[in-house]
Amino acid sequence: CGGSGCSSPGAEAAEPCCPAQRTPSPRRKWQVFPGRNRFYCDGRIMMGRQTGVFYLTLVLILLTCGLFFTFDCPFLASNLTPAIPAVGGVLFIFVMGMLFRASFSDPGVLPRATPDEAAHLERQMDSTGSSRPPPRTREVQINGQTVKLKYCFTCKIFRPPRASHCSLCDNCVERFDHHCPWVGNCVGRRNYRFFYLFILSLSFLTIFIFAFVITHVILSCVVLVLDPVRSTVLEVLVCFFSIWSIVGLSGFHTYLISSNQTTNEDIKGSWSNKRGKDNYNPYSYGTILSNCCAALCGPLPPRSVPEPPRSVPEPEPPRSVSTRTRTKLGLDPPPPPLPLLGSGSGTAQYLCVAVVGSGSAGSVPVCC
Ligand SMILES: [Zn+2]
Ligand SMILES: [Zn+2]
């Protein structure tokens, strides 16, 4: 079936997509992916499980822009300036590009622990304390602020700071912001900037279309004494009702970016002054400009579910082979060069590092 449209429904993902396909074929990481995400184009595109609202987003944008370019732009170009359809076209292409980047990207899924790694972590927890049951949290200091690392019972890992488990996608996501049904994906560390640029450019596009549709109506009715174009009524309605929510959402995320917070942290009030005078956001870089640069221009971590290799695939080893052995065999790319949590190895202790700002002091990598 070529992998297109195949999903990874838990244990079923270990089975071939097509029952008739009996010949042993190498399985990619995305084909044995334990979460509820959907993969397309041989694993290059990764989306959430429920994509219905994403298609509604597509229809609304395409319908409104299609009506605008078909019925309004010819009139506006001939009576005002041809720059109107040109600017509208550039904005439309940018909006669609950012939407697809946010929707089709890996949001920063953290790999689950293998059975060996989970057992190793359990033994570590049992040996560290005498209390029963063993503590399922760990504490780290980030810029003088104590941050708790919670144990994820599904992924069998201690979540890195700012990570959270998305119940819809059934994965832990790095720097989890929220799950957005409108883009059909989680919004996390790897796609947050594209999500933000999508809603920001969509705000400009909505205001742009709304303003020039109203201009078209006024010129048609008042100046040229013509009947208003019927299609403009639909455009005005869609723009009018969506403009408030989209512009409001853009403003909210601009505030979050300027203070280096996530939606998750803002809703929970993690860094609210109500929790105490000493409760401050340890991830803030100190200035609005630094926070904006970090969110929009900072480096993106590599995918944990890698794209398919371009070389000829090798036979798959037995399923009991650990991630480390698979890496040694060259079947999987090596994990990103990040410090490991605790003294163990492998994905259970994966990625416990937070490079956080300390105001004018610069970035301080915090490892535990
Ligand atoms: Zn998890
Ligand atoms: Zn999700």
Image: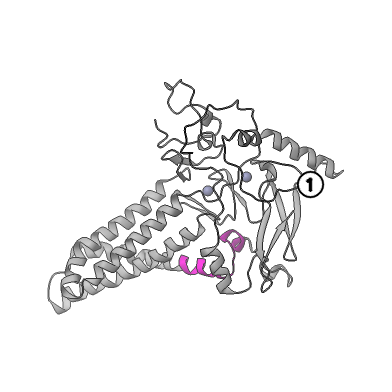
* Colouring used for the render: one colour
Extreme residue in the left direction: 225
Q: Is residue 184 magenta?
A: no
Residue type marked 1: Pro
Tell me the chief SS of the magenta region.
helix
Q: Is residue 266 magenta?
A: yes
Q: Residue at x 72, y 65 (%)?
A: 143
Q: Residue at x 45, y 68 (%)?
A: 248
Extreme residue in the right direction: 130
97 sits to left or right of 311: left
Residue 171 vs 210, above or below: the answer is above
Q: Quadrant of residue 66?
A: bottom left
Image region (quadrant) for ligand 1: top right
Pick the front one: 182 or 40: 40
Query: Which residues are the magenta region?
Result: 249-267
Extreme residue in the bottom direction: 223
Residue 340 vs 271, above or below: the answer is above
Question: Residue 38: x, y in percent?
Answer: 47, 40
Question: Residue 29: x, y in percent?
Answer: 53, 36
Visible in this render: residue 115?
yes
Residue 43 vs 55, above or below: the answer is above
Q: Which residue is mark 1?
A: 135
64 sits to left or right of 200: left
Visible in this render: residue 182?
no
